Structure formats: structure tokens, C-alpha cells
Image (spheres, rainbow, N blue to C red):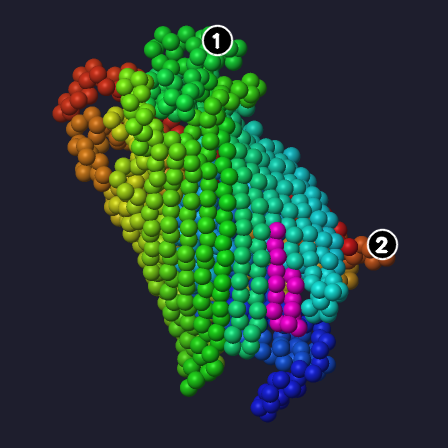
């Protein structure tokens, strides 16, 4: 090829700059790669799990080299730029690691029943489930760490909740998301600790690097519609302008744009869980400097609304009414209406062959409204059976009445503050048509506060997040055969949120919202992150050493005007009311600066030059630290003690990868130890009622093995699979949220397994592709995938009489009632039973049919997709509840115990022992038609 002779002859590439016009399709695919640090996906063909045989990101690199020969002899300038791009590509590759690439084919095969979280099942060690169709309260874990401990990015922009971590606080923003699977081209899954230039802020579980859909170089319009099970319908379009020659640029520098919209609505496979989602994306790519640099603008606006179940349904209710039954909205419901906006401006500038620079700015916000209702007849004094009880078991709901906290409000209670909280639901509604006389009389006879007026809540939050990300890449000249590729960059961001004003009432029909009963004020977090990474290539580019370091600093603040536990003003303290009753409301500011230095190193060796028989074989090892910071909401004055420092994970990982083109195999072992693990406990009764304890007393250990294989048996047939084995245990006894969903708190007992983490996970399948099957230039793809989920440990409750010894932060001793009241009803891992293993099969049949002589129509695409092909029933999530079978108070002290007489038998109700469960999705069938113009 001419360009090779030009370089071999030592001639300057500058001579080739005479030609100003180049081919857009050739140049853009290469120069985008040349101008900035390349995604690891270009190097990670070994660990890629895309099932079409060509990983999403590497496909672009392949097309670059393909077009080089066709254009290099025609365009001298193209020739020079492409060679530089390919040279930089080779230099910019990351060393091997356990990253998994998920591409466009797998996004399609995920179907509309799934979402950006269930898509992650294609990677080893990822377990996920959701309670509805689409993005409806997905929950997941990676290598035994919770999704709330995992970071995510969208084109490098942090998309996790920066105030809380991961996907945010429990039951917040669970319907919809900042981006959907219709807006992505794939995702890179980095378990453990990612390379510094791929990582983001606040994670001990890994980083999910989602890649956006970008405008095409050709004009096109794609219109699609789908009909599916459970009343699910989806429709939308994607419009690409192609290159728009004009004043903003011509040829390779011409801007191009994309507009995407879709609407999805479903009735849900669990009764009374309808949902609706809308997603909108506008993307603009503007190349410049003869296509060597790129400016990108991306706007996302997504909405989600629907009903969710705040807790799994009691098994007794499911046995009576069906596995997918749920309480009707006239009994109870939780509804969310959310909207998400994101604006990203990104620029990457090619300066010369050795230096490129970039800058990203972003802004995003969330508006979320949560509405919760429970019919007053569901409640009974002392937690007894209400109108919807089955076998004496009541539904659980998230209202104040559901927590039995209505007595905390009103005149004389410690939540009452004159002029701030004036709400008295009983006085307002006890004589209304929405509060039956039977309910009023029963609670009055028991001397308890009626739930009427406290059984309907509505609250809202608004979160703003904005920041900038500068970056610089330096490719030093080769010296003594040593090559250095340096990446450095920073993240400077701020996130703010109001303190969720909450209004109380009795019925959504009544539309009565009284004065704000929540605190006034809000949260904020400032983030300062900087990283430096150097990839050093030695021994004829066979030994690769990548050291790096990340500095993370964060300032967090909880600032309230009137808050329980705050500083009561002198004027309030002197008031007649506060003289008669204790006043507990006042102003408060909680703040903390936390920072960490987080090292990283990866060492890899390629055996290619040792022997031709070892070509494609590489080994690697990584060691790194990462940090997760305490949620800002825990800076509250109701927190006993100080806010804990960040949790730290120590990751050690080693593996081998082998790739011959037709056969790709990878395997690794990981060891991840979490120090200073967060522990949480909320006091329900006693002198500390309303207060919480948050500690750094915990330790967890995750370790296991992972493997992936992909074999291109023939040009048409591919076999693929992956498996993972995980052991996740607590190394200490401490207070903790003990479920992956973080919906229950209790005790992590030393040596116990973490619940909800499958011991074994596996995926296996076959993919068949064929062109010219029925028509010339058509394309048929059939994919059958099986997913095995191994045994999961579940949880149960303590009776209160267990002796766990000294508990961190708890001053009480075993044998006292205070010790009993803290343990009673607390959740721990159960070492018996659990969720049985299951296997789910999914089928996707996709057919591209070219169309000729029908106006502007160019192609039709038909997709037939079945999730859970054999309609297998399985439990996604399950746990056991133990409550004392009797109510009332202790008459005498149990033998060997003190302080029990006269105190409540149970703080958590009086129902019998029972279990709750969330079933997996039954067979889901969808049929989609795309028309391309």
C-alpha cells in the first residue's frame, strides 16, 4: 500500500496534506478514534460477549482498516490521517481485564420487557430482577455488591445518584431512568475497580459505561411499532439527517444530527402495576479540523409513571389469589411520576500526533412525585388483622399509618412544632365519609391514634446535578523501545436536592393536602476528582504495565430550617408551649469533607512473540482501591454519633485471555474485600426512638471465578457462554441493611452469606446468522439463550432473645429489655431454605428484508422475541417474617431477663410467622416491525 512505502521511506506525512477533500465514511470512522482515548472495547475482543461475532466498538476499528486500502490511493490526506489513527489505536488499547462488552444485538434481544439493568445479565457475576415491564424498580448486584454501590456513566458522564450512591435511596425514582435501552448502542461492564480513565465517582462494586446512539453518516428514517404480552405496546421513530453540508461545514466536517422518540405502555405482569414510559433524544455530531476533532451535543428527556409494589406480597395472599396477585388500588397503592432531563456538551480536539484534549460539561435534573395510599380499614389496633388480611397477615405499605407513627404528629408530640407542623389528621377526618366509624371506634377503644388522615401521603423531590470533565491524552515518542500513553483528567461536579416535602391526607379522591409535615431545607454534595494513568509498553509491546491513581474529595452538607433533633431557638424554648411540652424542632447544619487517594495497577503479558502456538494468549493481574461515600441524607441530626467515612474496597484480580479470531476464551479470579462497610440501625422505641445509628464497623468479602467463551464454529453458527461462581460473606457482626434491595435492616452476622446473591450464574446459547436466505441481501438471525441462576440465601427475623454479644454502637447488654427491643424483628440471613435454582430460556428471531420499488421504503425488519420461553415459574426475591404470635405487654420477666414486665411484646405487630415473595416474569412475547426509509 502506498502509505506504507511513504512511512518506510521516512517522508513527512505533512506532504500529504495537499488534498483538502476526503471521503466522509472513511475518514470519520478513523479520525474519531484518533482524537481521543479509545474505549477499552476496541482492545477487549477476548472478553467481549456480543453474539453477532463482532463487538460493538471493535466493529468501528475493523471498518476503518477495511476502507483504508480503497481510499488511501485516492486521497493522500485521508491516507495520512488514517495511518495516524490506526497507529494511535494500537497505542491506546487498554491492557486485558475482566471487562465485558455488550453490543447492539444483545440490546435488541433484551426486548421491551427488560431495561438497561436486565441487559447486564449478559455479563458474568451480574444478577438482576425487576417487578414490572420496562424500567420498573430494577434491582441488581455485581460480584456480590449491591447496585446501590455501583457507578454508571453515559458517554463518560456520571449518571448514578451522586448524593446517595448507585441508583439512589430506597424506592426513589424507580419508574423510568435518565436513559433507556432505546438510547444506547451498548455497555462496557467493569466489575470491581475500572481503569482510572474509565472510572467515575463513588463505587465499590464496579462501573457501567453505557455508550449512546450517535447520528448516522447517511440520511435515514426508522419507524417502528411493537405489540407484546400483558397489554404492552411500543411505538417510536429515529431520524438521521446524515451529513448536512452548509455554513457549519462541508464534506467530512459537515454536521449530522439524530432525533429519537419512543413511547411504551404496559399493564404489567403483576396485578395493578401499569406503567408508561417516554424517551426522547437529540444528538448532534460536528466534526472539525478535517474530521480530526469532534464536538457533540446530546439532549435526553425521559419520563416514567406507574404503580409499584413497595414490598413483596405475602405468600398467603398469593396462595389465595394467584402467584402474580397484588392488592387493588382501592386497598393500597404506591404511584410514581418521574421525569429526567440530561444535557451533555462534549468536545475532543486533536492537537497533534502526540497530544489530544477534551472537555465535557453536563447538567441533569430529576423531578419525582411519590403518592402512597392505604385504605383506613386495612389497619387495626396493635397491628391486628385488617380488612385485607389473609391468615391474619396484613399488607405492608409506606404510609405513616403503615409504620404506626401517626401518634408522632399533632399537639403535644415531639414532631409537633407550633407554626411549622400544625397537622392533626384525626381532628380533620375522623368524622368524614372516608374514615369508617368502625375504624374510629376500634382505635378509640384501644386508646390509640386512628390511621385516618395519615393513610395517604404525597411527596416530591427535585435533584440538580451539573459538572465539567477536562481530560488530556499524551502519547510520548518511543524511547529505547518503551512507549508511554498518559491519560489525565478530572471531574468537578455538584448535586443538590430538596428535603422531600411530604403532605398528609386521607384519600386521593378527597384531594386534601394539609401543611407540609416534612423538614425544610435540603442536601448538597460537591465533588472533586482527578486521575492520572500511564500505560507503559515494554519488550517489543508484549509487556504492559498500567499504573494509575485517583484522588477523590467530596464536601457534603445537610442544611435544615426546622428539623427534628435540630437546635431549638431560645425564643421557642421560652414559649408557653415548649414550657409545657418538650420542643424538638430547630435549625441544623451537618457537613463533612471526605477524601481518598485510590491507587490502581494492571500488569499484562502477551505471549505472541514467544511462539506462534501461543499467539492470542495473554495473562494479566490487577490491584486497586475504590471508595463509596455515605449518603448525604445520613448527615441528619437524628444520626447518633458522627457521619462515617467512605467505605473502601481492595480488589485483586488475575486472569487469562485467549483469542484466535474464531475462538475466544477468558477466565479470571477476583478477591474484593470491603473495609469500613456501612452499618445502619433505626430505633423504633425507647429513649432513642426516631434516631438512627450509622457506623463504619462492617467488613465484607467477595471472591469467585468467572469465565467466558465464544466459538465461531462456522460463518453461520456461533456458540457462546459464560459462568461465574461467587462467595460473599460478612467478616464481622454489625448493624446493616441486609438485603440487596436494601429494604430491610438488621444484623450482618460474622460468617453468614449475604442474602440475594446467587452462588452460581451461567449463560449459554447458540446464534445463527445467514444472508440471502429468502431474498438477495436479506439477513436472518436466530438466537437462543439460556440463563441459569443458582441457589440464593434469603433472610428471616430475630425473635429478640438471641445473644449476639456486644453490638457496635449499642450500649445495652444481653438479658435486658432494651437489648431485646433492638433485636426483636431485626433481619438476618437465614442459613436454611432459600430460593431454589432455576433456568430461563429466551428466543429472538430477527429478519432484515430489503425492499425495492416501493417509494422511499428501503427495508423492513421483523423481530419475534420470547422471554422465558417455557413459561418457567421462579422466585426472584423472597424472605421470611417472624413476629410474636401474641400482642400486648409482658406480664412478668422471662427467666433470666430483666425489665420486660409491662413492656410491649412486639414492636413490629402481632401477626403469625409468614413469608413474602416476588415472582419472576412469566413468558413474554413481543413482535416488532421496523420500516427504514
Give the total number of marks visible in the rendering: 2
Q: Is residue 812 above or below residue 111?
A: above
Q: Nearer the viewer, residue 772 or 797?
A: 797
Question: Is residue 821 something one can see in this rendering?
Answer: yes
Specify the label residue 854 is tagged with: 2
Residue found at the very far bottom of the displayed protein: 9
Vertical position of residue 859 compared to residue 268: above or below: below
Quadrant in which the N terminus appears: bottom right
From the image, state whether disc 2 or disc 1 is nearer to you.
1
Q: Which mark is residue 431?
A: 1
Q: CA distance from mark 2 to mark 1?
A: 69 Å
Determine crowd level at label 1: few under 14, some 14-19, many 20+ residues with C-alpha closer than 10 A.
few
SS class, disc 2: loop
Which secondary structure class fits the magenta region best? strand
Horizontal placement of 767 versus 461: left or right? right
Residue 500 in picture, x, y percent from top left: 46, 34
In the shown orientation, is residue 27 left or right of residue 397? Answer: right
Sequence-first tag of 2 and 1: 1
Q: Residue at x 56, y 29 (%)?
A: 271
**Residue 206 place in picture, x, y as percent:** 42, 55
Amino acid at each position: 500500500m502506498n502509505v506504507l512505502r511513504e512511512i518506510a521511506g521516512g517522508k513527512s506525512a505533512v506532504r500529504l496534506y495537499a488534498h483538502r477533500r476526503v471521503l466522509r465514511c472513511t475518514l470519520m470512522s478513523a479520525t474519531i478514534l484518533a482524537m481521543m482515548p479509545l474505549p477499552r472495547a476496541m482492545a477487549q475482543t477476548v472478553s467481549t460477549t456480543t453474539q453477532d461475532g463482532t463487538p460493538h466498538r471493535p466493529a468501528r476499528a475493523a471498518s476503518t482498516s477495511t476502507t483504508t486500502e480503497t481510499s488511501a490511493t485516492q486521497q493522500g490526506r485521508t491516507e495520512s490521517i488514517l495511518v495516524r489513527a490506526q497507529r494511535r489505536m494500537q497505542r491506546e488499547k487498554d491492557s486485558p481485564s475482566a471487562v465485558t462488552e455488550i453490543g447492539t444485538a444483545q440490546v435488541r434481544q433484551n426486548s421491551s420487557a427488560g431495561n438497561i439493568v436486565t441487559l447486564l445479565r449478559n455479563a458474568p457475576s451480574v444478577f438482576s430482577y425487576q417487578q414490572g415491564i420496562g424500567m420498573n424498580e430494577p434491582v441488581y448486584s455485581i460480584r456480590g455488591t449491591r447496585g446501590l454501590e455501583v457507578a454508571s456513566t453515559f458517554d463518560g458522564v456520571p449518571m448514578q445518584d451522586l448524593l446517595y450512591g448507585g441508583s439512589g435511596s430506597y424506592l426513589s425514582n424507580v419508574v423510568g431512568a435518565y436513559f433507556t435501552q432505546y438510547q444506547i448502542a451498548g455497555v462496557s461492564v467493569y466489575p470491581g475497580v475500572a481503569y482510572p480513565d474509565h472510572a467515575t465517582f463513588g463505587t465499590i462494586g464496579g462501573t457501567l459505561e453505557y455508550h449512546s446512539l450517535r447520528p448516522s453518516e447517511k440520511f435515514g428514517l426508522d419507524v417502528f411499532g411493537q405489540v407484546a404480552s400483558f397489554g404492552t405496546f411500543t411505538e417510536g421513530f429515529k431520524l438521521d439527517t446524515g451529513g448536512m453540508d452548509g455554513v457549519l461545514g462541508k464534506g467530512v466536517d459537515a454536521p449530522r444530527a439524530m432525533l429519537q422518540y419512543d413511547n411504551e405502555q404496559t399493564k404489567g405482569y403483576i396485578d395493578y402495576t401499569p406503567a408508561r414510559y417516554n424517551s426522547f433524544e437529540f444528538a448532534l455530531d460536528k466534526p472539525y479540523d478535517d474530521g480530526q476533532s469532534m464536538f457533540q451535543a446530546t439532549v435526553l428527556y425521559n419520563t416514567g409513571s406507574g404503580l409499584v409494589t413497595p414490598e413483596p406480597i405475602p405468600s398467603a395472599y398469593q396462595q389465595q389469589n394467584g402467584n402474580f396477585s397484588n392488592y387493588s388500588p382501592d386497598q393500597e397503592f404506591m404511584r410514581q411520576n418521574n421525569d429526567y432531563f440530561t444535557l451533555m456538551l462534549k468536545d475532543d480536539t486533536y492537537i497533534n500526533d502526540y497530544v489530544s484534549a477534551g472537555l465535557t460539561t453536563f447538567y441533569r435534573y430529576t423531578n419525582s412525585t411519590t403518592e402512597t395510599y392505604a385504605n383506613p380499614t386495612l389497619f387495626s389496633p396493635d397491628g391486628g388483622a385488617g380488612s385485607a388480611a389473609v391468615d391474619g397477615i396484613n399488607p405492608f405499605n409506606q404510609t405513616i399509618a403503615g409504620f404506626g407513627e401517626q401518634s408522632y404528629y399533632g399537639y403535644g408530640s415531639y414532631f409537633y412544632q407550633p407554626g411549622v407542623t400544625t397537622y392533626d389528621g384525626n381532628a380533620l377526618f375522623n368524622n368524614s365519609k372516608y374514615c369508617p366509624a368502625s375504624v374510629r371506634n376500634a382505635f378509640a377503644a384501644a386508646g390509640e391514634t386512628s390511621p385516618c388522615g395519615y393513610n395517604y401521603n404525597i411527596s416530591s423531590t427535585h435533584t440538580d446535578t451539573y459538572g465539567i470533565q477536562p481530560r488530556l491524552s499524551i502519547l510520548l515518542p518511543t524511547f529505547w523501545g518503551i512507549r508511554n500513553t498518559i491519560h489525565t483528567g478530572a471531574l468537578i461536579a455538584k448535586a443538590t436536592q430538596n428535603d422531600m416535602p411530604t403532605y398528609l391526607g386521607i384519600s386521593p379522591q378527597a384531594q386534601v393536602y394539609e401543611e407540609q409535615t416534612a423538614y425544610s431545607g435540603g442536601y448538597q454534595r460537591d465533588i472533586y476528582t482527578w486521575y492520572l494513568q500511564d500505560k507503559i509498553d515494554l519488550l517489543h509491546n508484549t509487556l504492559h504495565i498500567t499504573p494509575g491513581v485517583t484522588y477523590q474529595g467530596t464536601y457534603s452538607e445537610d442544611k435544615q430550617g426546622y428539623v427534628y433533633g435540630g437546635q431549638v431557638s431560645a425564643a421557642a424554648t421560652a414559649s408557653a408551649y415548649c414550657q409545657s411540652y418538650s420542643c424538638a424542632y430547630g435549625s441544623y447544619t451537618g457537613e463533612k469533607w471526605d477524601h481518598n487517594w485510590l491507587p490502581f495497577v494492571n500488569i499484562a503479558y502477551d505471549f505472541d512473540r514467544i511462539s506462534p502456538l501461543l499467539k492470542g494468549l495473554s495473562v494479566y493481574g490487577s490491584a486497586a482501591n475504590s471508595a463509596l461515600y455515605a449518603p448525604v441524607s445520613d448527615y441528619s441530626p437524628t444520626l447518633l454519633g458522627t457521619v462515617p467515612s467512605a467505605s473502601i474496597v481492595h480488589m485483586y484480580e488475575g486472569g487469562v485471555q485467549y483469542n484466535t479470531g474464531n475462538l475466544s476464551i477468558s477466565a479470571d479470579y477476583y478477591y474484593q474485600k470491603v473495609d469500613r462497610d456501612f452499618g445502619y440501625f433505626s430505633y423504633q422505641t425507647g429513649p432513642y426512638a426516631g434516631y438512627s445509628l450509622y457506623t463504619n464497623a462492617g467488613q465484607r468479602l467477595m471472591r469467585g471465578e468467572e469465565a467466558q467463551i465464544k466459538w465461531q464454529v462456522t460463518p453461520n453458527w456461533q456458540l457462546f457462554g459464560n459462568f461465574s461462581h461467587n462467595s460473599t460473606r460478612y467478616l464481622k457482626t454489625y448493624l446493616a441493611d441486609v438485603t440487596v434491595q436494601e429494604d430491610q435492616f438488621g444484623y450482618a452476622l460474622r460468617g453468614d452469606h449475604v442474602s440475594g446473591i446467587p452462588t452460581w450464574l451461567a449463560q449459554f446459547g447458540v446464534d445463527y446468522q445467514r444472508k440471502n436466505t429468502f431474498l438477495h441481501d436479506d439477513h436472518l438471525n436466530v438466537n437462543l439463550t439460556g440463563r441459569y441462576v443458582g441457589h440464593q440465601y434469603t433472610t428471616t427475623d430475630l425473635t429478640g432473645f438471641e445473644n449476639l454479644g456486644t453490638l457496635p454502637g449499642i450500649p445495652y447488654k444481653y438479658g435486658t429489655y432494651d437489648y431485646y427491643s433492638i433485636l426483636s424483628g431485626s433481619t438476618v440471613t437465614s442459613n436454611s431454605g432459600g430460593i431454589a435454582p432455576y433456568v430461563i430460556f429466551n428466543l429472538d428471531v430477527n429478519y432484515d428484508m430489503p425492499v425495492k420499488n416501493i417509494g422511499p421504503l428501503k427495508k423492513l425488519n421483523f423481530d419475534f422475541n420470547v422471554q422465558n420461553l417455557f413459561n418457567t415459574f421462579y422466585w426472584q426475591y423472597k424472605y421470611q417474617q417472624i413476629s410474636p404470635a401474641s400482642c400486648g405487654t409482658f406480664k412478668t420477666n422471662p427467666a433470666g431477663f430483666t425489665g420486660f414486665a409491662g413492656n410491649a411484646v412486639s414492636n413490629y405487630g402481632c401477626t403469625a410467622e409468614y413469608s413474602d415473595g416476588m415472582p419472576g416474569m412469566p413468558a413474554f412475547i413481543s413482535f416488532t416491525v421496523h420500516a427504514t426509509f
